[in-house]
Image: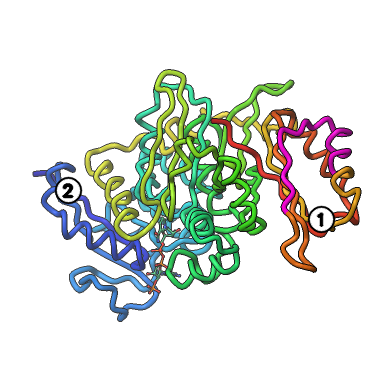
Amino acid sequence: MNAPLRIGIAGLGTVGAGVIRLLETNRDLIAARAGRAIEVTAVSARERGKDRGVDISGFAWEDDMTALGLREDVDVVVELVGGSDGPALTLSRAAFKGGKGFVTANKAMVAHHGLELAEAAEAGGLALKFEAAVAGGIPVVKGLREGTSANELTKVYGILNGTCNYILTTMESTGADFAETLSEAQALGYAEADPTFDIEGVDAAHKLAILATIGFGVELDFANVTTTGIVAVRAADIAQADALGFVIRLIAEADVQQDADGPKLLQRVRPCLVAKDHPLAPVDGPTNAVVAEGNFAGRLLFQGAGAGDGPTASAVVADLIDIARGDVGAPFSMPVTQLASLGPAEPGGRTQRTYLRFTVNDRPGVLAEITAAMRDADVSIESLIQQGRAGEDSEVLVAIVTHEGPEANVVRAMELLEGSDSLTGEPLVLPILPS
Ligand SMILES: NC(=O)c1ccc[n+]([C@@H]2O[C@H](COP(=O)([O-])OP(=O)(O)OC[C@H]3O[C@@H](n4cnc5c(N)ncnc54)[C@H](OP(=O)(O)O)[C@@H]3O)[C@@H](O)[C@H]2O)c1
């Protein structure tokens, strides 16, 4: 058998310890599939003495993880620390400078610095792999980079954040409101103590930008992902959506559209109504799912665990097996110099059906005011539901589903209603995902 592939691991938390456990548990099978053994030679984390549930006594220890990039006995550095900049980025640069391959689960770093890293990897003929950075254990990076590589993709979209999906589907099953469900998710470990990146859609945006680059052959453009989180979704919206035949999911979607001055990239993350018979509707709990539509493959659905030590370690080690087999390849499916620079699409010209929710004062003329704004902005109403008062002080909820029409018209209608003293809060505007 060939010489072992020697790896140095930075970060021994959930994923790092999972990788060590997986390499140990499936040692023989991995060696057989990789054509050689994969051996950990050195590790680094913050606290050397911490019990991590795995035996690290046989590995060299580095206090400064950057040193992993310089070690003679390391072929590939595995970065499982996190953070878009800081030590993880310093380590990646050191690894490429030291002639090492680099595997990471760090979506924030890849979304922000992926092109720089890929350039360094390509210049050195080195591997850069990040399967675990998108949708945990689901082989969707591989799916798009290899499985659909013969296709022109028309669309990539899906559920890319397990925390949001857990919260939304729990709200669905319990009828509880957002704040209560978030606290419960935190207690159960499905949401971080600081959940901002998840519930505001930033984490999904990181992953979407990476998928768009691989799927469409475009330069990474995380800065232009428009992002709306799930904080404004109420239990009442989920109940209304249910009555109308929908569920609510945080959907990340990307496609390339032809604008007047050429092709443009549309990337957005936002809660959407999803018809109950859509393949994304039954995706519940912390599960992730990605739909890719190819011009020859048709619609493909990738689904599975988007996080957790086992699934994420599975993706990291799959990357290592590829490297052990000699697969270097372009990290984003084509060399960085061939990725197109498209610029962001203007979404206003798109058409969609839309769900609108208003909370209003219960007094005559309010409904007329809302429907007049719709008429003046040329938004055609398909259905309107007014939910009666639940108590003396409670507000009235008005839910509207529009016919398909330009997004810009809905924006205009909302502008017409801005500042109206009939409204008791910000309206909620949720697109309806096409089936
Ligand atoms: N958890 C998941 O399910 C999951 C899924 C997909 C992707 N990811 C990504 O995987 C990466 C790791 O996530 P995780 O959940 O395993 O995180 P984690 O449990 O918080 O572990 C982070 C590890 O990094 C070490 N570390 C932090 N700062 C360091 C520094 N300055 N120098 C050296 N070591 C440092 C910590 O050391 P100590 O242990 O000594 O404190 C810890 O071992 C992140 O990029 C994350 O986004 C995670």
In the rendered view of the protein, which quadrant contains the C terminus? top right
Describe the element under mark 1 as helix, strand or loop: strand
In the rendered view of the protein, which quadrant contains the N terminus? top left
State whether residue 416 appears in this view: no
Specify whether 413 is left or right of 120. Answer: right
Give the extent of the magenta segment.
370-387
Disc 2 residue crowd, few under 14, some 14–19, many 20+, Cα 10 Å: many
Residue bearing mark 2: 30
Cβ(mark 2) to ligand 1 < 8 Å?
A: no
Residue bearing mark 1: 360
Q: Nearer the viewer, residue 374 or 332?
A: 374
Which residue is rendered at x = 86% and y = 33% of the image?
375
Q: How many labels does the image show?
A: 2
Q: Is residue 375 magenta?
A: yes
Which residue is rendered at x = 78% and y = 34% of the image?
408
The x and y percentages for residue 107 are 48, 52
Q: Which of 201 and 114 is in front in this view?
A: 201
Ligand 1 sits in quadrant:
bottom left
Q: Is residue 285 above or below residue 142?
A: below
Q: Is residue 423 magenta?
A: no
The x and y percentages for residue 280 are 47, 40
Closer to the eye: label 1 or 2: 1
State whether residue 12 appears in this view: yes
The x and y percentages for residue 15 are 34, 61
**How far apart are labels 1 and 2 at the CA level?**
61 Å
